[in-house]
Amino acid sequence: MILLAIVVCEVAFWAALVAGLAARYLLRRPRLGAAFLIAAPVIDAVLLGLVAVDLLRGGTASWQHGLAAIYIGVSIAYGRRMVGWADRHFAYRFAGGPRPARLTGTAYTLKCWRDVGLTLLMVAIAGAIIGGLVLLVRDPERTSALTGTFRILGLVLGIDLVVAVSYTIWPRKPERAAVPL
């Protein structure tokens, strides 16, 4: 049940994003577009409520409950960046906006380190949600699957840190221009 809720919320998030951008650029209705874009945090709140209700009604936590916490953490930490990315690409494709730049060198390295900060925020949010659910249920047998999610969060943060360090040591090089023959 929770896995289905996560899938529905993920689809709803992207549908709200596309509808918001379509309203903004294709229909030229920026306020309607903003209303759709504001729906993203509401979708996260609905998912969090569904997870809490499931556990309070006696459900046993599973990896899906941990995934829901991670999804909410990613959505909150990276949501603004995802919306900005989609907005720039949508404006370029459908509204004559400038082509989104591909970052290289120091600019890309700094972006990687900002990603580490956002991932740290995501880990903190997901960890707080998991900890809150464990405290809410107060039954270690029913919530043992949730505590295993902390290892996954640590792994994700570690991978992001390795990526940032690697681009610090070996910065992304600019694309070479095609040489005519």
Image: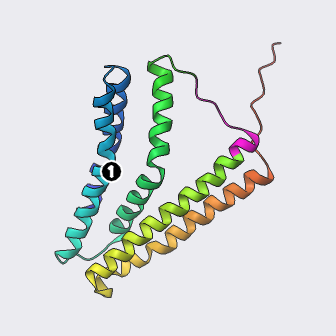
Q: In the rendering, at what x and y percent does residue 36 appear?
A: 29, 37
Name the side, left or right, on which 131 lies relative to 93. left
Looking at the rendered structure, the secondary structure element under dot 1 is helix
- Badge 1, how many Cα within 10 Å: few under 14, some, many 20+? some
On the question of residue 173 being in view, the answer is yes
- Name the quadrant containing residue 181: top right
Identity of the residue furthest to the top in this view: 181
Looking at the rendered structure, the number of numbered marks drawn on it comes to 1
Q: Is the image coloured rainbow, by chain, by secondary structure, or in one colour?
A: rainbow
Residue flagged by tag 1: what amino acid is it?
A: Pro
Q: Is residue 106 magenta?
A: yes
Q: Look at 33% across and 44% down and name the residue there.
A: 13
Main SS, magenta region, reads: loop
State whether residue 11 appears in this view.
no
- 43 over 155 or under it: above or below: above
Q: Residue at x 43, y 65 (%)?
A: 125
Question: Percent position (x, y) of residue 10?
Answer: 34, 48
Q: Quadrant of the N terminus?
A: bottom left
Name the residue at 29% across, 82% down. 142
Side of 179 relative to 20 (left or right): right
Judge by depth and name the residue closer to the eye, 46 or 163.
Answer: 46
Q: Could you tell me residue 18's position as x and y percent?
A: 35, 33
The answer to which of 81 and 141 lies nearer the viewer is: 81
Q: Residue 101: name its quadrant.
A: top right
* Image spot of residue 6 (x, y percent): 31, 56
Q: Which residues are magenta?
A: 99-108
Most distant residue in the front direction: 31
Magenta residue check for 107:
yes
The front one of 86 and 117 is: 117
Q: Where is mark 1, residue-wise?
A: 41
On screen, residue 162 versus residue 133, left or right, reads right
